[in-house]
Image (tube, rainbow, N blue to C red):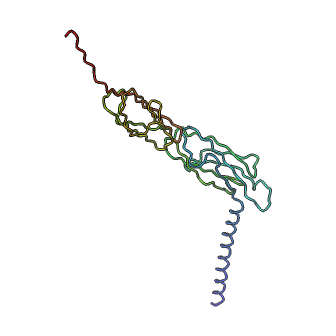
Amino acid sequence: GVQLARLDGAWNRLVVFLLSFAIATQLLMAGEIAPTVQIVAPHNGLVTHTDTVDVQIEFTASAQDGKTTSTGNVSEVPVFVNGIEMANQTIKPNIKNGTVRFVLDLAARGDGPVVLSASAWQGNRHAGHRGDSQPITITIDRTAPTLAVAGVTAGQLTNTAVTPIITITDANPGTSSTRLNGNAFVSGTTITAAGVYTLLISATDAAGNTRTLAIPFEIDLTPPVIEISGV
């Protein structure tokens, strides 16, 4: 009974040792063999209105104890959109490092964020080692800013002062300009002088979508002249 117990204890220690060795070996191999890969273009946070995006990916095969066989080279680089593989480039001949380029068609996608990521396979895709990039997020925005003006309307003729209030709305705001008869104008400024005016508003969002709005109006403070003749 004692001898059997000793054998069981030795067997358990052997199993634990073998499992620990296997796990350590896998971790070491993953650290040595998995290639590095990163998306260098576009930059994270890009906002675009275009239907295509140019993606450039850099990869580097991991050192493999000085081996120079093809298993130490990168063989394939796939790119993913929202986690789904959209394109793949086979590297022939397999090389240690390089750059690949994809032009992804995003025309069918609506406005909103898109997550891009990439991988690189070192050795055979089905039996090799994969390295993954950090994901980046770009935003598709094909909608121009919305411009609204309160306090005055296009074509208005009035005999009182007006105070235009301008509101520019966009999911990805950029730059804007407001001019009154060619001069810079601040929303909320009251216009009291008589005259013919054109309020011109333009806005361009972060994606490059542009909208302009022109509001012509007139302030007439001169009362009618009454003439009586024949008396």
Q: Position of residue 195 (x, y in %)?
A: 38, 27
Q: Position of residue 92 (x, y in %)?
A: 74, 46
Relative to 229, is 90 on the left or the right? right
Q: Residue at x 50, y 35 (%)?
A: 210
- Which part of the image, by quadrant, shows the C terminus? top left
Q: Residue at x 77, y 53 (%)?
A: 70
**Along the line of sight, the residue nearer the viewer: 17 or 37:** 37
Q: Residue at x 73, y 48 (%)?
A: 98
**Along the line of sight, the residue nearer the viewer: 54 or 119:** 54
**Along the line of sight, the residue nearer the viewer: 195 or 84:** 195
Taking 69 as reference, is 25 above or below it?
below
- Which part of the image, by quadrant, shows the N terminus? bottom right
Q: Position of residue 183 (x, y in %)?
A: 47, 33
Taking 9 as reference, is 155 above or below it?
above
Relative to 49, is 77 on the left or the right? right
**Along the line of sight, the residue nearer the viewer: 211 or 220:** 220
Relative to 146, is 35 on the left or the right? right
